[in-house]
Amino acid sequence: MVVGVLVLAFVAAGEIYDYQDTFDGVHLPEVDAIVCLAGGRGRITTAGDIWYRYWETSQVPVRGAGAHPAPKKPPILFFSGMGTRATFGTVGRQVHRGVLEVLKPEHVIIENESANTQQNALYLARYAKKRGWESILLITSPYHMRRARMILERVLTDEKHPMGIETLSVFQEPFEPGDWRSSIQGIRVTLTEYLKLMVYRAVRRT
């Protein structure tokens, strides 16, 4: 029976990659925060680069707003899952130098209490509700995005704080989503995440 379950998972696990991001890499949607579920260096670096693009846009004067318009604030950079010892310095060591030159502690929130995706979502939802955020850009890995968004949407509903969610998947693994069966790491990561997704779906129905 166990073998049968594993075979079925091996066949169906690619489902976790059947997801289309909403962030196209060109347009910058209006968001209150860039949320990075920081499970790896690539995600943090990308989140910093995207934030920098918003920062650059915020420095452009708004036409018709007067001779000295107030700068538009860039989104908050919200990190979750970096560990209990994470600090602004930890973030600074993982973003590009140009980003670090303009990134200030007041631009960053580091949530370092959560230990899994469910807790990531819960702490995020409470921060968002408290600050009145209406939309976010969620950044994580392709294998994780489908379950992460599903959990976050459920938690936001439970917290009675519906919010727009844009998404950007960051490719940082040494395998492509379409070729995950060709490497041991790809198989391990994909099967583990698929089983987590199946468990979450089963629990959610109860």
Image (tube, rainbow, N blue to C red):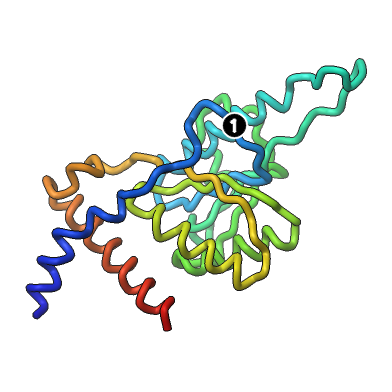
Q: Nearer the viewer, residue 12 or 59?
A: 12
Kindly identify which residue carries mark 1: 28
Q: Nearer the viewer, residue 61 or 39?
A: 61
Q: Identify which residue is drawn at 74% across, 20% down.
A: 60
Residue 103, given in percent of the width and then of the height, sits at 65, 34
Within 10 angstroms of label 1, few (less than 14), some, or many (20 or more) residues?
A: some
Q: Is residue 58 above or below residue 90?
A: above
Q: Nearer the viewer, residue 46 or 160?
A: 160
Residue 118, given in percent of the width and then of the height, sits at 48, 68
* Residue 153 as seen in the image, left or right of residue 134: left
Q: Identify which residue is drawn at 27% across, 62% down.
A: 194
Residue 138, given in percent of the width and then of the height, sits at 52, 48
Badge 1 amino acid: Leu
Q: Is residue 95 above or below residue 148?
A: above
Q: Is residue 86 visible?
A: yes
Image quadrant containing the C terminus: bottom left
* Residue 160 as seen in the image, left or right of residue 115: right
Q: Is residue 94 visible?
A: no
Q: Is residue 43 above or below residue 148?
A: above
* Residue 3 as seen in the image, left or right of residue 179: left
Q: Identify which residue is drawn at 86% across, 28% down.
A: 70
